[in-house]
Image (cartoon, rainbow, N blue to C red):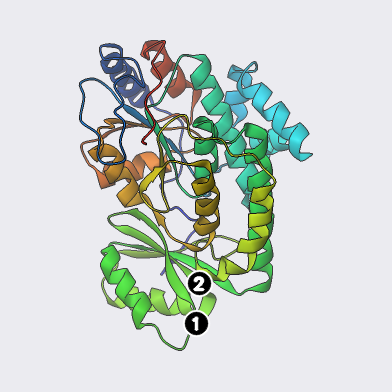
Amino acid sequence: MTRIPGTATVHRPDTKVSRAEVARAEALGAQVSQAPAFGAGQTAGGAAGERVPGTRCLAMFPGQGSQRPGMAADLVRRYPDTAGQIFAMADDVLGLPLTKLCVSGSAEELRRTDVTQPAIAATSLAVLEVLRAGGFEASGVAGHSLGEYAALAAAGVLDAQSVLRLVRRRGELMAEVGSRTPGAMAAVIGLPAERVEALCRDVTGTGVVEIANYNDPGQTVVSGLTEAVAHIETLAARAGAERIVRLDVGAPFHCSLMRDIEAEFGVELDRHVFAEPQLPVLSAVTSSYVRRAEEVRLLLRRQLVEPVRWVDTVRRAVADGHNLLVEVGPGRVLTGFAKRIVPDVRALGTARPQAIDALLATAGQGASRPAVPA
């Protein structure tokens, strides 16, 4: 069994954007410039929308596991009036040196759940602000776990300050569970999700172990008590898994062990104002559209104890006509997942300013606001 650093997502190490990647981004941008502006042509309705000509973009927001040292260094330096202002606001709202942590913090500092979550959220919000200032508009949004909070900001459901306060408290409460519960998470790679589900059902006498993430067709994450997760690792290896990766996390996310904090986090959610979505929001809890503000509150509570259904969420987005998926935030984890879920989909990351600039250079301007599913 392989044990490598990571969190709720497993991915290849992030590297600098190559010239080839920038060229691909520029080529993609050229295609976009020949189509209707981002956001144009969105159809209403909760069922799969009618396909329309042109480019319809889903903005995807990453979760825990996308952090890396220096992830905001180039961002803050290149875009001080947009990204820099978001980080300054985050520092002030949380009383944390988030700018310093995201620019020069160590991997160990960024590993702490109560730091990781606001750090990733702030970075995603900063990238979003840069994209919006350049004329980018999405036709819909979705977020992977923690990423749902930044997605809700993009859709006008939450303001940035509420996002930061909520994810800070979420991280603190999750860390508390980890401190008192011997929990673990592991990614099973190379087995169908149905087989991993069966393994979880077969485990008896070792405690809670449940599916936490359906990341892509070949990667399913389990979460639960340490002994039970270890049992699943052994069974998965015997069943022919290509790899089993014990995740470097501080708590067992997205399983029933988080139920202890559900009510307390619900109190925190009630302190914040939730507006009606101004963009279509795909929930990764249900893989369906969120239509009302109160529904969002309930889903954010459910998210603590239920799996991230990312495979179904991406498939739903593509079925509804989104033909460009843009990962808004640090890393390229979701970009990789998307290409493995729907191999012919166009997916693009924004982890580096070069990729952002290439996208904005040819992105449509003045996009119309899409209809929200009724």
Q: Is residue 130 visible?
A: yes
- Residue 269 position within the rendered picture, expressed as x and y whole percent measured from the top left: 64, 49
Helix, strand or loop at label 1? It is loop
Q: Please, what is the three-letter code of the amino acid marked with disc 2? A: Gly
Contact flag, marks 1 and 2 (Cβ < 8 Å): yes
Q: Where is 69 relative to 36, above or below?
A: below
Report the residue at 32% width, 70% height from top.
196
Instruction: Look at mark 2 in the image and give the residue it sits on.
Output: 224
Name the residue type under label 1.
Gly
**Residue 289 place in picture, x, y as percent:** 38, 43
Q: Which mark is residue 301?
A: none
Crowd around label 2: few <14 · some 14–19 · many ≥20 (10 Å): many
> Which label number is shown at residue 207?
1
- In which quadrant is the C terminus drawn? top left
Number of marks: 2
Asked whether, in this view, residue 191 is left or right of residue 349, the answer is left
Label 1 packing within 10 angstroms: few (<14), some (14-19), many (20+)? few
Q: Please, is residue 341 above or below residue 60 in the view? A: below
Could you tell me which residue is drawn at 63 percent across and 69 percent down? 260
CA distance for labels 1 and 2 = 8 Å
Which corner quadrant of the image does residue 173 belong to?
A: bottom right
In the figure, residue 219 lies in which quadrant?
bottom left
Q: Quadrant of the N terminus?
A: bottom left
Foreground: 331 or 127?
A: 127
* x 33%, y 76%: residue: 199
46 or 9: which is nearer to us? Answer: 46
Residue drawn 50% across the image and 34% down it? 329
Q: Quadrant of residue 102?
A: top right
Q: For numbered disc 2, what is the local secondary structure?
A: strand
First-in-chain label (1 vs 2): 1
